[in-house]
Image (tube, rainbow, N blue to C red):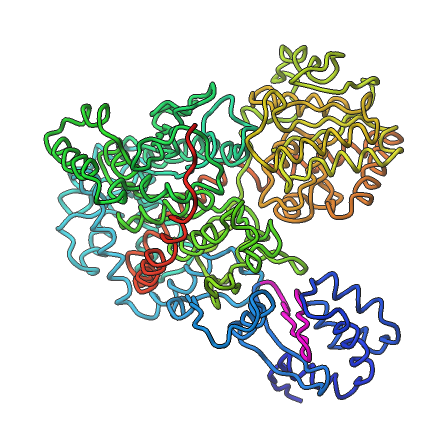
Amino acid sequence: MSRRLTRLPSLKERLDETLTAQRNEIICFLSRISSHGKGILQAHEVTAEFEATSGLDKLADGPFAEILRHTQEAIVLDPWIILAVRPRPGVWEYIRVNVDALAVEELTPSEFLRIKEELVDGNTNGNFVLELDFEPFTASVPRPTLSKSIGNGVEFLNRHLSAKMFHDKESLRPLLNFLRMHHYKGKTMMLNDRIQNLHSLQSVLRKAEDFLSTIPADTLYSEFDHKFQEIGLERGWGDTAERVLDMIQLLLDLLEAPDSFTLEKFLGRIPMVFNVVILSPHGYFAQANVLGYPDTGGQVVYILDQVRALENEMLQRIKQQGLDIVPRILILTRLLPDAVGTTCGQRLEKVYGTEHSHILRVPFRTEKGIVRKWISRFEVWPYLETFTELSQLSTSSDSIKLHLALRLLLFNLNLRFILMRFLPQDVASEISGELQATPDLIIGNYSDGNIVASLLAHKLGVTQCTIAHALEKTKYPNSDLYWKSFEEKYHFSCQFTADLIAMNHTDFIITSTFQEIAGNKDTIGQYESHMAFTLPGLYRVVHGIDVFDPKFNIVSPGADLSIYFPYTEENRRLTTLHPEIEELLFSDVQNEEHTCVLKDRNKPIIFSMARLDRVKNISGLVEWYGKNDKLRELVNLVIVAGDRSKESKDTEEKEEMKKMYNLIDEHQLNGQFRWISAQMNRVRNGELYRYIADTRGAFVQPAYYEAFGLTVVEAMTCGLPTFATCHGGPAEIIVNGKSGFHIDPYHGEKAAELLVDFFQKSKVDPSYWDAISLGGLERIEEKYTWKIYSDRLLTLAGVYGFWKYVSNLDRREARRYIEMFHALKYRQLAQAVPLAIEE
């Protein structure tokens, strides 16, 4: 008997059916929800109410209970209960139930958001509300439909568009044009004008294939470059006959029968990326003596490691392409005249371990001049446009007009050294001056770096990559709905607007984990939270981003293997640092660098290292430890966080510091606990991880949310068993129970008991500790290395650069929409953020 496919019933239809069958039970539950009065219930509160309502056994395994399990929010607005239901990551439905009439209605995102706005601002009485909807601009962009495909954008895009090439041979013509347009500083690469059409291209490639088959594989390209030039082929195919032949055969295969794997492989080898610009304006960006300063942590480490790996990969690729081009990487950040003992006041600084990569610093400016002091990442917004391009300063300023005219004259006269020394600079002019070329790839980091990257990429027409690191919206619950109460301290209206612009303007987005994009079955992803939201009284976003968009790609970073390596590699261990480390951990001296002492140095050590802010939850870990007598008996606790040598300028850090001192007194931790100020020396920190492993200890990362978790990777790379938050990236890095353990920071008692269980088992059977340590090392080697990362990033740059050229994926219409949003809304919000007061 044949089976016929049928349409799945909608959420409304399933709820209607259940209301008919279990009317009394549902009325009982909905009445209980309504009794809370007007307001919003979060997912865990809805679940708790269902479990607390008696007589609902009939509903437990039915459609109604399933809908509640997927409900993220429930709004009570008499006589309605409105549900935001998320059947799976990236898919949302909105319904409302009339409690009196038991009628069910479907809602659009706009209708749902309007109801939320009424809760906050009351009835708007039909007042105009600016609605943002990016969906019409991406409707023609191919995208997957399965949640498991989220974050594999380039694979999906290649499959779709290579299939299009296969069915329509004319679609191959843009590939020919793309190969012909490759030049670098006046030098032609790949193809010259002798090849005018696909037929002549195929003919030339076959001639080249026949010739290369007759010469030794290791023959250098220079020995036959003139012969190839005469038939239309230029440098860029490879450095040896073997590599050139492989490249030519890839292209012949593509022209004959396009497939996604061959397409990606070929595009990844085309010489496209020689100059890279990386944006990271906020914080103290330097290579030494900055980690632990406000707004200065994992992002700095990430970028420096990224740059070293990228340069190595670029050099290797350029050599294998048979080119003699010198690549350049510039990290653009803020110059801080008040550099507090760091190099942040230095304009140009070479990146250690590289030959062609530099940190280039540009100051923030106002019409009064250079801003000298550190500014919180939440308050940088009024400076970023002039940081990007100085012409954004008020055009009524005669000095700025004079500066722009003089700068143009000096560039034309090739007197750049005078310009650099005596005239104020902006990012756009500094890039032009340093590179003497347009960058091939611009990478933004965090909200401020991404908005600057968007402005530059828009101006220069360059491929843009976005790396969020952490979108603040999910870190601060209800920071969109109640944005006005957060505004004075955080200015989220400006930040969320910048995030929307950047994620819609960019060509591709890199995330470290799936959770960063679309969360998991229980929690919402960082990007997913921007699909539909409202800032009441400001604007309503009915379609901000689609997590199924093929611009999303998961590319996980690693740790610097020259610093972080297994504790078992005795011949590489930095034993000369052990006296310093032992002084840090065990000395009886209490000073600005370390407070409290460890009386029993034979115990294993629980170790954690992070910025001292609310989200990192370091004080939470201290509290878990203080309350668990078994854990205190088994192990010592060592924390590296904050700078106790001076009063912090960061409000959250000051609050957390006060909490730490209170916990020390409340639980009488002195004797079992050591609090060490932030350590700037990464090399010593690497050996510190290994020293903790020598004690048979563990690393704990207790954050309420962690976008990725670089310290988790560092600890695991050193062989230190790791316990990390289940909220965010660490849940993907660690395979629970095999390469580490997941902990829930909202259930500290359970986390402490999990630690107790681990150390008790390890005490009885030391091989248990060894197994988790080895599992962590194997997990890192399998997935989290900078070599894998850099190879993937450059391949993505090539593929998205190609599709941007040959298709409509440059989204011109959307970018005009973004221009208007930027000019009419973002700029107004940025200008409203108060400027820093210079003392």
Position of 203 compared to 770: left or right?
left
Please tell me whether residue 417 is drawn above or below residue 2 in the rendered image.
above
**Horizontal and vertical percent position of residue 362:** 34, 32
Position of 629 compared to 677: left or right?
right
Looking at the figure, which quarter contains the N terminus?
bottom right
Counting labels gives: 0
Q: Is 79 colored magenta in this rendering?
A: yes
The answer to which of 288 and 368 lies nearer the viewer is 368
Position of 629 compared to 332: left or right?
right
**Horizontal and vertical percent position of residue 779:** 64, 40
Write the residue at 81% across / 73% down.
60
The quarter holding residue 85 reads bottom right
**Horizontal and vertical percent position of residue 77:** 66, 74
The answer to which of 268 and 120 lies nearer the viewer is 120
Looking at the figure, which quarter contains the C terminus?
top left
The quarter holding residue 673 reads top right
**Horizontal and vertical percent position of residue 740:** 72, 40
The answer to which of 494 and 744 lies nearer the viewer is 494
Q: Is 388 colored magenta in this rendering?
A: no
The quarter holding residue 437 reads top left
> Secondary structure of the magenta portion, mostly?
strand
The answer to which of 622 and 558 lies nearer the viewer is 622
Q: Residue furthest left?
A: 413
Please tell me whether residue 821 is drawn above or below residue 355 in the rendered image.
below
**Magenta stretch?**
71-89
Please tell me whether residue 188 is drawn above or below residue 529 in the rendered image.
above
Write the residue at 54% across / 35% down.
298
Please tell me whether residue 332 is drawn above or below residue 50 in the rendered image.
above
Position of 583 compared to 342: left or right?
right
